[in-house]
Amino acid sequence: MSLFEKHRDLIARAVKAVHERTFYAAFPEIPKAYAEDAAQKGNETYAGYLNRNFTALLQKDSGHWEGEEVSPYTQEPLGIKYPVYHVEELVAASNDAFRSWRKTAIEDRAGVLVESLEKMQEHFFEIALATQHTTGQSWIMSFQASGPHAADRALETIAVGYDELTKFPHEVVWEKPMGKFSVKLDKEFIPVPKGIGLVIGCSTFPVWNSLPGLYANLITGNTAIVKPHPKSVLPMAICVALIQHTLKENGFDPNIVQLAVDSSILPISIKLGSLHDIKLIDYTGNTQFGNWVESLSHKTTFTEKAGVNSVILDSVKDIDVTLQNLAFSVSLYSGQMCTAPQNFFIPEKIKSGDQVLTHEAVVVKLKEALTALVTNPKMGAGVLGAIQNEKTLHRVHDASAMGSRAVLPSSPVKNEEFPQSRTVSPVLLETSATDVKTFETELFGPIAIAIKTKDTDESIRLAKEVAAQHGAITCAAYSTDESVMKKIADEMNEVFVPVTFNLTGPIWVNQHAAFSDLHVTGGNPAGNASLTDAAFIVKRFVWVGNRKMN
Amino acid sequence: MSLFEKHRDLIARAVKAVHERTFYAAFPEIPKAYAEDAAQKGNETYAGYLNRNFTALLQKDSGHWEGEEVSPYTQEPLGIKYPVYHVEELVAASNDAFRSWRKTAIEDRAGVLVESLEKMQEHFFEIALATQHTTGQSWIMSFQASGPHAADRALETIAVGYDELTKFPHEVVWEKPMGKFSVKLDKEFIPVPKGIGLVIGCSTFPVWNSLPGLYANLITGNTAIVKPHPKSVLPMAICVALIQHTLKENGFDPNIVQLAVDSSILPISIKLGSLHDIKLIDYTGNTQFGNWVESLSHKTTFTEKAGVNSVILDSVKDIDVTLQNLAFSVSLYSGQMCTAPQNFFIPEKIKSGDQVLTHEAVVVKLKEALTALVTNPKMGAGVLGAIQNEKTLHRVHDASAMGSRAVLPSSPVKNEEFPQSRTVSPVLLETSATDVKTFETELFGPIAIAIKTKDTDESIRLAKEVAAQHGAITCAAYSTDESVMKKIADEMNEVFVPVTFNLTGPIWVNQHAAFSDLHVTGGNPAGNASLTDAAFIVKRFVWVGNRKMN
C-alpha cells in the first residue's frame, strides 16, 4: 500500500475540513490519547540532546558547529551545537534534491508528508520541551503550539495544496467542433514548482510559524531550507530531522528539506535570501526585516510581521467576566503572541448589564483582573511563562518606569519549578486618545495600554487607523448592540482585520484554530500572507498546459 | 427573478468548464447564430460613432475631449473624441462607487456582470469594426477576439471568481469539545475587496486583453478604471459604456467601472497608477512599462509583457503541412499576436517521414510557404490584416534591410478592400545559433528568424535560455519521437513555457482557448499573471473571518 493510500482518508477529510471550516466536525475523534510512556520518553530524549552536538540531521558532515540557545526558565545555556554550512552548499544540495522532488507525483508527495507528521506526533513531548526551553512558553502551551496545533496547520497546507494541485485534470482531450469535422488536442496540465523555498523562523513560535510555509513548499514540489532563529533552533531541528528520516525511509532525497543554522553574530538570512535560486521566502519576525523580504523582486514572499491588536469595549453583559477573559489574553505567554491584545479602547462610559461604568472604573477593574490572575499561585506563573529575551524585558521595565501613566507597573513573578525564570507581571499603561505616539506601535511583551476615548466611534476610528498604518492581526470587541457590532466588523474588516466578539470563559482572542480561523489576513502591514488561504499555496507553483495534436 | 437566478445555470456550467478544461463539453450549443440584421446594425452603429464626441458613457460631463485613433486600413483618423478627466476625479468617483459595490453580494455581482456580457453580445459587430479600424486585425479576427473570445475569457473570470468567493461558508458554527462542555463560536467568512483596480490596455488586443482583469476586479468587489491605449480607445469605450448601462439599469452605480482616456502626448498611466487608492493594476504592453508596474510596492499587479516564442523542429511526418501551419502562425495578424512564433530552431538535419532534409532545404520550404500564403489572393491580405503602428513597420523595414541574412524580405501586400492598408509580407531572417543577440529579443511584428542549430538538444537549450531570460508565452514543437517530445516539454515547462506539439491543419499555436488554455503562465519574464488561474482572482481580495461568542 502506498503512503497515499495509507493516508487517503485523512487527506480527504482534511480537504473537507478546509472547505467547511469547522474542523471538529471533520475530525470528531480529536483529541487523541498519547502513549502512557510518551511523556517520560520525551523527557529522556530531550535530556539526551543537551550539551552535545545535534547529530540527528541527514545532511552531510560539517566541520563547523554552533549553538547559543539559553533557557528563559533556567537562564542557562542548553549547550547544544548544530552543524553550520555555507549557504552555497545548502542551495546546491537543495537544487539536487529539487530535480527528483519536482517530478514526484502530488499523491506521493502528500503521502510522505502526512507520514512525516505521523512520525512527528510520536515526538511531541521532546519538541514541547525544546520549545519551552527556547521560547519561554509554558510546557502546556509549548506542547499544544509546537505539537498538535502546528501539525494541524501543516496538515491544512497539505490539504489546500492537494486541493489546488488536483484542481485541473492531469490530462484531457479537447475537441473543437468545426462544422463537418472537429479538431482534437490532447492537453495536459502541470503544476510546476518555483524552486527552493527559504523558511525563516522566529524565537517565540519556532514550529507553529515555520511548519505551514515549509509544508506548503513541499506539497507544491518545491524544496525547502529552514533557517530557525539562532535562539530557538532545537524545536525545528527535531522536526527537520524527522522529516528527513521519513523522506529517506521512503526512498526520497533527505535534502528535500535542510536545516540552515546561523548565529546572532554571523546571521545568514540576507545572504541566503538574496541568492538567485531561492525563489520563495516565508518569514516570521520583526517588521524591518519583513519589509526587506517583501521588497525582494523576482521572489515570492509570505510574511508575518508586527501588528498592534486592539480591544474595543463598547458595552458588556458583565464587565468582570469580560476583563477576566482579556486579562488572560494579555498575560498568556506574557503578551509574546502575535495575536495578543495591546490597545484597550475604553470610552468615557460603558454599559455593563444594567450599570453604567466610567472609563476610570473599568481601568481599575482591568488592573485588578490582571493582578488577580498573576498573583493566583495556581495560575500566574503558568499563564505568563517566561520572557524569551532581554530586549522584551527592557521594554517592560521602560514601560513600568513611565510614572503616572504606568497605572500597574511590572514586578517579578516567582515560578516555583524554575526559580531563575525570567517571568514578570504585565504592565498596564493609561493614556488619552490623542497620545497616538504611545499606542501606534507594537510594544511586544506583557504591556497593555488603556486609552480613554470619547465614545465607541472614536475607539473604532483609532483602532482602524492604527491597523491600517501599522498592521493588526486580531481585534477583540465587546458590545451588546447588534448594530454597533456590525459597524465595528465593517470598519475593521475594511482594513483587513478580523473581529472577535464578546469572548468570555475558556476561549481567547489569541487563539487561531487550524482549518477554521485564517491567521493574519495578508491585507494590512502585519503581513502579506494568510494561513491558509488559496494564495498561500497557489503562489508557490505555476500551471503550465501542454497540447498535442490528437 | 434576480439576475443571478436568470444566469444561474450559465454560471454553474462556466464553473464546471473551468474545472474540466474542455469548454465545448460544457457548452455544446456554441457557436450560436446572431440576428440576421446584426451585421448591418453593427455597421450603422459603428458609422454613427465616427467623427463625433463619444457620448455613450455614463460618466459626468467633461469639458475636455480628445481622440487620436487612425485606421491602419484607411490610414485616416476615425475622428472620435472621448471625454478626458483628471485622475483625481476618476478615483473619487470610483471610491464613491466602491462603498456600495464592496457590500454587494457575490450572487448579485455575478448576475449583473453576466447580464453585461449578454448585452455586449448584441454589440459584437460594432465592437469588431472598432477593433479592426484601431488594431489592424482582419474583420473576422476582430469579431472573434473582441467578441465571443473576449466574452468567454470574461465569463471565465466570473466563474473562477464565483468559485473562489464561495469557497468558504458565509456563516458557520464552530464547536470545540472541552470535555464536559463545549465552546461554540459563530464564525463568518468575508472576502474583502482591495479597492480600485486600474486596467491598462494595449493597441493590438484592446478588448481581449482588458476584459479579464476588468471582470476579475468587478466579480471580487473591486471597482475599476479602464485606461485604453490612446490609439485604440473605441472598442473598450463601447464595452465600458455597455457595462455602465447594465449597471445603471439594475440599480447599481455606473461608476463601478469608468473609462480613463489619455493621449500620446499627455499619458496618464504613471500618474494614475501611482495613486494610493489604486490597489490593483492589470497591464498589457511593453516590458519596460510592465517592469515599472511590477515594481510598485503595496500594489497587486497582473502583467503581460513581451515574450520571444520559439519553434523547435525535431522531426515531422510531413514538412510541407508543418510549414504551412507555421507560416500561417507567423502571418496571422502580421505577427502582432503575443503568441506568434518568432524563433525557428532548425537543426542541421530533420527527418520528414522517410526523408532526411537539411536545414537549408527546410528554410527554403519555409520561405516558400510564407510566400505562397501571402501571395494567395484569397488569403494573403486577410490573414495579414494591417500593421497597427509605424514603429512596427519600421522594425520590418530594418529587418528587411539586413542583407544576406534577410532570406525573405518584406514587401507591400495589396488589400483589395482597403487600398491604403498598412499591410506588408513577413520577413524571414536566417542566422546561426551563436547569434543570440539577434534572436533573444522580441521583434514584434511579421518577423521570423530561422536559426541553424547542431541538433535538437541545442535548439532546446537556446529556446529555454531565451525564455528564462526574456520570457515566452508559447512554444511550438514538432517531433515524431515520444522521448524527444517529453524532453522538450520538461525543459520548456521548467522555465514555465507551455509547449504545443505537432499542429497541422486549421489550428495554430497562437490560439489560446478560454476555459481550457492558460494564457501566459506568469512564471517567466513574459508576465506575472495567467488567464485564468486561481491566483488571477484570489490576489484581488482578502479573506477576513469574524467570530462571535454563540
Image (cartoon, coloured by chain):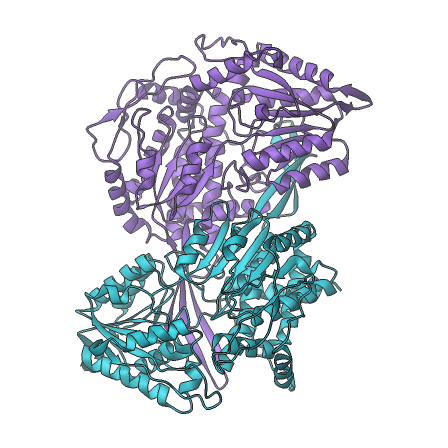
Chain colours: A purple, B cyan
Residue toward you, A415 or A128: A415
Whole-percent x and y of residue B433? Answer: 20, 67
Q: Is residue A383 visible?
A: yes
- Quarter of the view holding residue A213: top left
- Quarter of the view holding residue A232: top left
User: Looking at the figure, which quarter contains the C terminus of chain B?
Assistant: top right
User: Looking at the figure, which quarter contains the N terminus of chain B?
Assistant: bottom right
Picture layout, residue B184 above or below residue A536: above
Whole-percent x and y of residue B443? Answer: 33, 69
Residue toward you, A444 or B9: A444
Question: In the displayed structure, does residue B471 sit left or right of residue A447?
Answer: left
Q: How many marks?
A: 0
Residue toward you, A127 or A423: A423
Picture layout, residue B386 above or below residue A2: below
Whole-percent x and y of residue B206? Answer: 51, 69
Q: Is residue B509 visible?
A: no
Give the residue at the far right of this rendering: A354
Question: In the displayed structure, does residue B362 sit left or right of residue B234?
Answer: left
Picture layout, residue A236 above or below residue B323: above
Residue toward you, A519 or B16: A519
Whole-percent x and y of residue B173? Answer: 66, 40
Residue drawn at point x = 45 percent, y = 45 percent? A158
Picture layout, residue B228 above or below residue A89: below
Question: In the displayed structure, does residue B264 sit left or right of residue A41?
Answer: right
